[in-house]
Image: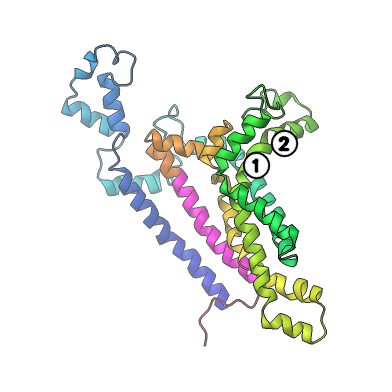
């Protein structure tokens, strides 16, 4: 009952936390220069057009106060801040129904829906492969602590960790994408799928998808690879040194039984901390990786929204990621209970 009460409280706490996050960010973006009103005024004055470079005569166009007010009304900036926020929250459905300033007046949800499958595919693949590789590798390193295998794998893992993911992607692209005559032309230079993907057979689609995803996925998992592997190793080593393991051995139990039957479950508790991030994997794409491999995912959409001051798109993505991240924290606590049922979130009597 205490656990149920705890999870109910955590779920209810999501509401004020979400409101706090969005109110703060919504307030801050009102003071960021270069918003849609300023961009429209600059366009009317000729800035950014091909004519402005010749003499700059168009830049002397005067914008009257009535014109400015009309532009502010067009973008909804004529209303007080609380009214704008409440409209964004309720009328626009957390910005999902709002229209983008930049992408041909599409709604935020239409833009997210277009790029959702791409980021979701990379996110799930990278997440699953990271855990499938790092957890067994960490266990193997712990069981062979100090051996040549442990030392050699640690060197490789740490060297890869020291390379930024986007830099690693540029290296892979140079070596294996035919960008230079001196290297291999094995993988496509970028994109998510081939242009003729719809015309391919089922097996052809699978091969084409793997072909395009192989290098970007390597870059996606490299950032968390070292951290998760070392965390798994150290967590298991810490459990092996606990008194309850010595008790199992003293009672005649084997080391195999002590590790696999007792230590491993407790060692997995720190690992499940990252399980909650599975809810945000569709928005976790690296902006730089997407730019290196020309992948039109959510990360690149977020960057374009920030650079282009497309407030509605940015706030819509922020709202989705905030909700999913908060739910992910609760999901992580639930995973704690599954791994170790002894965990009690209630107060001690």
Q: Mark 2 to mark 1: distance in Å? A: 10 Å
Magenta part mainly helix, strand or loop?
helix
Q: Residue at x 51, y 39 (%)?
A: 287
The residue lying toward the viewer, choosing from 107 and 251, is: 251
The disc label shown at residue 94, or none? none
The residue lying toward the viewer, choosing from 146 and 47, is: 146
- Which residue bears the numbered disc 1? 217
Q: Is residue 340 visible?
A: no
Q: Secondary structure at mark 1?
A: helix
15 shown above or below 44: below
Residue 295 drawn at (x, y percent): 58, 33
In this picture, which residue range is highlighted in magenta? 317-338
Please check the rendered image and state whether residue 183 is part of the magenta-colored stretch, yes or no: no
Q: How many marks?
A: 2
- Which residue bears the numbered disc 2? 210
Please check the rendered image and state whether residue 322 is part of the magenta-colored stretch, yes or no: yes
């Amino acid at each position: 009952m205490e656990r149920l009460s705890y999870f109910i409280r955590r779920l209810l706490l999501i509401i004020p936390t979400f409101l706090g996050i969005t109110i703060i960010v919504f307030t801050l973006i009102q003071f960021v220069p270069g918003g849609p009103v300023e961009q429209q005024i600059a366009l009317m004055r000729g800035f950014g057009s091909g004519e402005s470079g010749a003499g700059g005569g168009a830049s002397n166009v005067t914008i009257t106060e009535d014109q400015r007010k009309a532009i502010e009304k067009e973008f909804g900036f004529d209303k007080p801040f609380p009214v704008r926020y409440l409209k964004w929250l309720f009328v626009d459905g957390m910005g999902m129904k709002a229209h983008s300033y930049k992408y041909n007046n599409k709604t935020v949800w239409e833009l997210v829906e277009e790029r959702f499958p791409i980021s979701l595919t990379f996110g799930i693949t990278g997440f699953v492969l990271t855990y499938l590789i790092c957890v067994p590798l960490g266990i193997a390193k712990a069981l062979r602590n100090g051996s040549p295998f442990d030392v050699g794998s640690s060197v490789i893992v740490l060297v890869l960790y020291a390379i930024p993911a986007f830099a690693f992607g540029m290296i892979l692209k140079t070596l294996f994408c035919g960008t230079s005559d001196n290297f291999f032309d094995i993988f496509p230079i970028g994109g998510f799928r081939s242009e003729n993907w719809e015309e391919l057979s089922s097996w052809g689609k699978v091969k084409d998808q793997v072909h395009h995803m192989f290098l970007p996925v390597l870059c996606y998992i490299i950032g968390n690879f070292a951290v998760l592997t070392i965390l798994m190793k150290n967590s298991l080593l810490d459990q092996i040194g606990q008194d309850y393991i010595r008790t199992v051995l003293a009672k005649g139990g084997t080391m195999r039984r002590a590790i696999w039957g007792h230590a491993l479950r407790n060692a997995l508790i720190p690992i499940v901390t990252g399980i909650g991030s599975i809810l945000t994997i569709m928005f976790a794409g690296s902006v730089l990786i997407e730019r290196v491999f020309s992948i039109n995912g959510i990360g690149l959409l977020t960057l374009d929204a920030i650079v282009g001051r497309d407030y509605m798109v940015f706030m819509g993505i922020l709202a989705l990621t905030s909700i999913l991240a908060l739910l992910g924290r609760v999901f992580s606590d639930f995973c704690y209970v599954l791994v170790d049922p002894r965990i009690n979130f209630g107060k001690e009597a």
